[in-house]
């Protein structure tokens, strides 16, 4: 057994400085080469214990911390893809995370999403409050972070504290207590926040000190691994590389991987079995690599491999290992329900992250799968009886199928969540609006004087609609008793289906005689059942003021003979 390097991933909102911070730590300048200075590819690197000691310097002596971890394996990612793809059986492979927040911008949509993902995987994290150099009045001092803060002007210190405690409040809304790292008395109960600057390097030693200290103190048991055993790993990316063909970017988190090893790669169907041709770390070739290590693996027949899938050495008992690998994959091909939406994603980890967030937002999932949207997905969505489930969600996938079914695709999870919640909200309103079509709506009419055109069989009279909308075939009442129904409406010599408030027309009423049941000047109301009334009360938002007032009048009339009518 030995202690491996803890695996740390950077998460946070786009452009808050995840890659820049890693560059400061590694002393490289990858960000400057990226289009738009936003990371386009997953990268990983090991920061050795010697570099950690060099960067942290006297800070380690001050807290009496003797480092025993061999270093830290850092993952950088565009968004959360690497984090969600960094998985192993029973959870996420990342041992710890750095949540990067621009101290001047605060919590943004992807920050919220990152926190929710960290919560769902129960991954410990610290917060890097980046871009302190942009706080108005900030001046870099040639000393450690805490001394530097004390040497700032009072107004600058106040601005720093205001921003910091505003973020403490925002983090608390997610159920976490947070505090500036030097004020944390118990790291198991509070999230450490380290002010820093990727540009000037301020706070980087303190960030690494807190990270290394936490990893060593609280994660040491989980970092113990069998070095000589079979390699266990996870695919981050599958890509083409010049001179090598298709290669796997992977993390080996346990055991040792050797050239010529047989490996089994998880799949949605039959596992892939192949042989390792070559292993690289950056551009250097190795015969074998022990955990924890970021590697590039060249092997035949891996074009169909999917990011997020597990890898395992299988020089013996191949069938048993294939079974184990597929069982692990099966645990992630998401728990689904009998009724719900269809979701698709580009990788196993993305599918799992999307599923977790949708469930947090109380959205049911019927089918979850990897790959572009297909005709089968459309058929599955169409077969749903609940209109709110007749939708397909795609994360980082294409839709080339023509369909009337609602399809929501995006490469940012939080936008997908926003879009489906917005769509479902509109659908609910539309469903409720349609349900009104099956109900008798409140209206009242007045029989106009000198406008009796026929006494009976059917009676034809002139009326004015005082409230609501008069429709044919709706029942009429007087004094709480149903009398007749609207057989037809004639307006300006034409037969119409409905008549709006304020308009006058002639209507025909079967089964009654003018002068007996009704007379000129009478006010009649729509007749409705108690069940109809209760449903209308729930849908009041779709009624206008006059209709609501008329509904109350109808209730008052009906309660003259039954105190609890419609209650």
Image: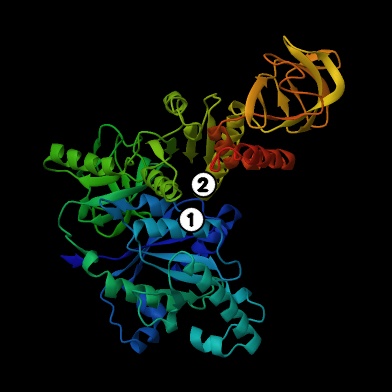
According to the image, label 2 marks what residue?
Answer: 417
Residue 378 percent location from the top left of the image: 46, 26
How many labels were placed on the picture?
2
The residue singled out by tag 1 in the image is 113
- Look at the image and name its color scheme: rainbow
For marks 1 and 2 on the same chain, the one whose residue lies earlier in the sequence: 1
Quadrant in which residue 105 is drawn: bottom right
Residue 204 shows in the view: no
Q: Depth check: 38 or 392 in front?
A: 392
Measured from the top left, where is residue 432 in percent x and y? Answer: 58, 35
Disc sitting over residue 472 in the figure: none
Secondary structure found at label 2: helix
Residue at 52%, 65% in the rendered image: 20
- Determine whether the residue tagged by mark 1 lies in a helix, strand or loop: helix
Of residues 472 and 16, the one drawn nearer to the viewer in this rendering: 472
Between marks 1 and 2 in the image, the one whose residue lies nearer the viewer: 2
Question: Mark 1 touching mark 2, by CB under 8 A?
Answer: yes
Q: Position of residue 114 (x, y in %)?
A: 46, 58
Residue at image coords 58%, 37%: 561
Residue 517 lies, with reference to residue 344, above or below; the image says above
Disc 2 residue crowd, few under 14, some 14–19, many 20+, Cα 10 Å: many
Image side of residue 31 versus residue 381, left or right? right
């Amino acid at each position: 057994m030995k202690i491996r390097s803890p695996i740390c991933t950077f998460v946070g909102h786009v452009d808050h400085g995840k890659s820049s911070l890693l560059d400061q730590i590694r002393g490289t300048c990858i960000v400057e080469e990226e289009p738009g200075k936003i990371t386009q590819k997953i990268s990983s690197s090991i920061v050795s214990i010697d570099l950690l000691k060099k960067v942290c310097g006297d800070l380690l002596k001050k807290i009496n911390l003797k480092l025993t971890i061999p270093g830290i394996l850092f993952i950088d990612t565009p968004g959360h893809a690497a984090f969600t793809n960094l998985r192993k059986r029973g959870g996420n492979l990342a041992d710890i995370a750095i949540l990067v927040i621009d101290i001047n911008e605060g919590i943004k949509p992807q920050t919220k999403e990152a926190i929710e993902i960290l919560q769902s995987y129960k991954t410990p994290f610290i917060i890097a409050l980046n871009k302190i150099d942009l706080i108005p009045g900030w001046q870099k001092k040639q000393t450690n972070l805490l001394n530097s803060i004390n040497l700032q002007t009072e107004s600058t210190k106040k601005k720093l504290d205001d921003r910091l405690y505003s973020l403490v409040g925002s983090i608390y809304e997610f159920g976490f207590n947070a505090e500036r790292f030097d004020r944390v008395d118990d790291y198991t109960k509070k999230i450490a926040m380290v002010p820093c600057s990727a540009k000037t390097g301020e706070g980087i030693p303190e960030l690494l000190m807190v990270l290394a200290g936490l990893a060593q103190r609280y994660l040491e048991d989980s970092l113990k691994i069998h070095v000589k055993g079979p390699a266990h790993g996870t695919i981050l990316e599958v890509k083409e590389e010049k001179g090598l063909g298709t290669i796997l970017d992977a993390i080996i988190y346990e055991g040792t991987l050797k050239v010529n090893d047989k490996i089994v790669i998880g799949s949605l169907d039959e596992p892939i079995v192949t042989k390792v041709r070559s292993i690289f770390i950056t551009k250097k070739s190795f015969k074998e690599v022990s955990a924890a290590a970021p590697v590039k693996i060249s092997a035949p027949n891996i074009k169909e491999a999917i990011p997020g899938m597990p890898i395992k050495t299988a020089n013996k008992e191949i069938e048993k290992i294939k079974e184990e690998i597929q069982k692990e994959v099966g645990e992630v091909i998401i728990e689904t329900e009998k009724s719900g939406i269809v979701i698709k994603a580009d990788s196993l980890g993305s599918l799992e992250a999307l599923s977790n967030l949708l469930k947090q937002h109380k959205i049911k999932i019927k089918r979850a799968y990897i790959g572009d949207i297909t005709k089968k997905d459309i058929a599955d969505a169409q077969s749903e009886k609940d209109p709110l489930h007749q939708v397909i969600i795609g994360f980082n996938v294409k839709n080339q199928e023509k369909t009337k079914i609602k399809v929501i695709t995006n490469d940012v999870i939080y936008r997908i969540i926003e879009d489906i919640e917005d769509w479902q909200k509109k659908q609910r309103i539309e469903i409720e609006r349609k349900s009104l079509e099956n109900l008798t709506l409140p209206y009242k009419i007045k029989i106009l004087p000198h406008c009796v055109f026929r006494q009976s069989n059917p009676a034809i009279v002139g009326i004015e609609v005082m409230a609501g909308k008069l429709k044919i075939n709706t029942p009429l009442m007087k004094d709480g008793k149903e009398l007749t129904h609207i057989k037809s409406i004639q307006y300006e010599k034409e037969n119409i289906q409905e008549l709006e408030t304020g308009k006058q027309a002639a209507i025909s009423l079967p089964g009654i005689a003018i002068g007996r049941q009704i007379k000129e000047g009478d006010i009649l109301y729509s007749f409705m059942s108690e069940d109809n009334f209760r449903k209308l009360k729930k849908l009041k938002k779709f009624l206008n003021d006059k209709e609501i007032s008329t509904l109350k009048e109808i209730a008052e009339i009906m309660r003259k003979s039954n105190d609890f009518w419609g209650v």
